[in-house]
Amino acid sequence: MSPSKTEPAAATGGHERVLIIDFGSQVTQLIARRVRESGVYCEIHPFNKVDAAFLSAFAPKALIFSGGPASVIEGQSPRAPEAAFALGVPILAICYGQQTLSVQLGGVVEGGHAREFGRADVEIKRVSPLFEGVWEVGGKYPVWMSHGDRVTQLPAGFEVIATSENAPFAIAVDEKRRFYTTMFHPEVAHTPDGGKLLRNFTHKIAGLRGDWTMAAFKDEAITRIRAQVGDGRVICGLSGGVDSSVAAVLIHEAIGDQLHCVFVDHGLMRLYEAEQVVTLFRDHYNIPLIHADESERFLGALEGVDDPEAKRKTIGKLFIDVFEEKAKSIGGAAFLAQGTLYPDVIESVSAIGGPSVTIKSHHNVGGLPERMNMKLVEPLRDLFKDEVRTLGRELGLPEAFVGRHPFPGPGLAIRVPGQITREKLQILRHADAVYLDEIRRAGLYDEIWQAFAVLLPVKTVGVMGDGRTYEFVCALRAVTSSDGMTADFFPFPMDFLARAATRIINEVRGVNRVVYDVTSKPPGTIEWE
């Protein structure tokens, strides 16, 4: 059984597990990422799906309570399952987690005090295994706070071991029961030592070995795939991105020629990208591959469409149609492989069970299995993106594929704001290729999470030689991130931007002006749609 928000994973190879109970924080995923970075397997499940039976089945070696947007002093606010406190395992409760733990164990939380949002300094008052080897008594250390309410009276058995200016109970612990609570968020990058604190919790306090590696995952995943598929046939939709590529190679290693790949080329790929995908999978790995060049069909359907969500839906519908047609030509496949990742799994249900806001539609998932009456093979659904890259290296995939920047499913369609034309796509492909070439020449590609060019629906007057031009504006985008959830623009030196802009204007016919996007996420998105 694959892990989901409501059921514990049954196939984690006997690894020690940490359960993260989610109260709706925007950064709960980061807790899981930090824990996994230290080799400890963990899963996120919403508070309202975790009861005594769930806890018994999951058998966690430790619990972590996440933050959340609610106020514990309001009626019907989330609570941890009472059974969690009787498990006898260590608990780390973060922000809202600290507050609900305190209230549930007899403490008091109040609103109306000074709030803390952003950077703060905690002063260490007592020694604790939580920060052994990291922080010293009397020292002050930067952390990230995000709270309005605060604990004003601790439950019996707890003591304060660190304070901040507006959080007198910044760290409060019950060492006897191994309950640790923090008002700040150790999981975010703005708490520089947060990863070390989490490792102390999992390894020193909970005594976990940290035995979850990508090498172990690969072997276990191959075993699971073989058990699930048997002698059946599997179809995998290749996009050329990291996720589908790693999934395909992993499945191929498990079942060989029982796997057939379909690469739907929608005509919205980057320069020479389609050729690279075909060469890698058909020639290098010798994986049966159907290259469905349907660019005319897709571009025809997109003619006159300018709304980005309408573009996604148009591409999504056609993708399903084409994939279904090509799958029928293979015949007899009972399984559909997808590169679903753990963030996709845990975002499918919000922490309070309600619908989440649709920022953008994913182009190639919805409706396909149901229409085709196929069972899903999703070997990566336990993994985050960085773990997928590590797995790809374990499988021997070329670094050019493993390390490539994320690329949206709808491709260049959403990097051409407004209506799409073949001329605009050609201009953008070449501008993007020049930009990425300059990034690679500067040795900056691996420092950047994602970099790309955008062709704006704007023309401006320019001068080339003695002539007047009236051509498009090209925007350049590059961001740093660890997970794609938040991002900062990459601080290129001005001489780099000048060099990239000059090359694009000189080499790409149709562009006479280049601008650089310095918007972070939030408030912007990484893509330009």
Image (tube, rainbow, N blue to C red):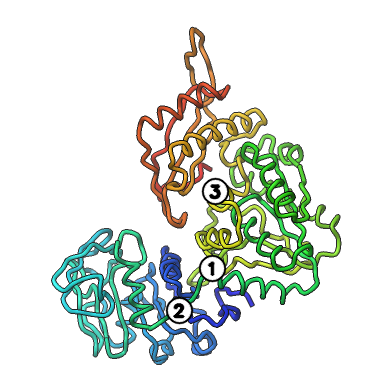
Task: Look at the picture and state if 479 lies above or below 191.
Answer: above
Q: Residue furthest top?
A: 466
Question: What residue is shown with label 3?
Answer: 404
Question: What residue is shown with label 1?
Answer: 214
Which of marks 2 and 3 precedes in the sequence?
Answer: 2
Which of the numbered marks, if any, corresponds to residue 152? none
Q: Is residue 233 left or right of residue 154?
A: right
- Asked if the residue at tag 1 contacts the one at tag 2, i.e. Cβ–Cβ closer than 8 Å, the answer is no
Which of discs 3 and 1 lies nearer the camera? The answer is 1
Point 76% across, 67% down: residue: 335
Which of discs 3 and 2 lies nearer the camera? The answer is 3
Nearer to the camera, 158 or 501: 501
Q: Is residue 427 left or right of residue 148?
A: right
Which of marks 1 and 2 precedes in the sequence?
Answer: 2
Q: Quadrant of residue 337?
A: bottom right
| Rendered-image quadrant of the N terminus | bottom right
Nearer to the camera, 84 or 10: 10
Residue 363 location in percent, x, y?
64, 52
Q: Is residue 458 left or right of residue 151?
A: right
Task: Look at the picture and state if 179 lies above or below 449.
Answer: below
Nearer to the camera, 251 or 329: 251
The Cα atoms of the two marked residues, 2 and 1, are separated by: 17 Å
The Cα atoms of the two marked residues, 3 and 1, are separated by: 19 Å
Question: What residue is shown with label 2?
Answer: 18
As shown in the figure, which amino acid type bears the numbered disc 1? Answer: Met
Nearer to the camera, 220 or 429: 220
Task: Look at the picture and state if 288 lies above or below 515.
Answer: below
The kind of secondary structure element at disc 3 is loop
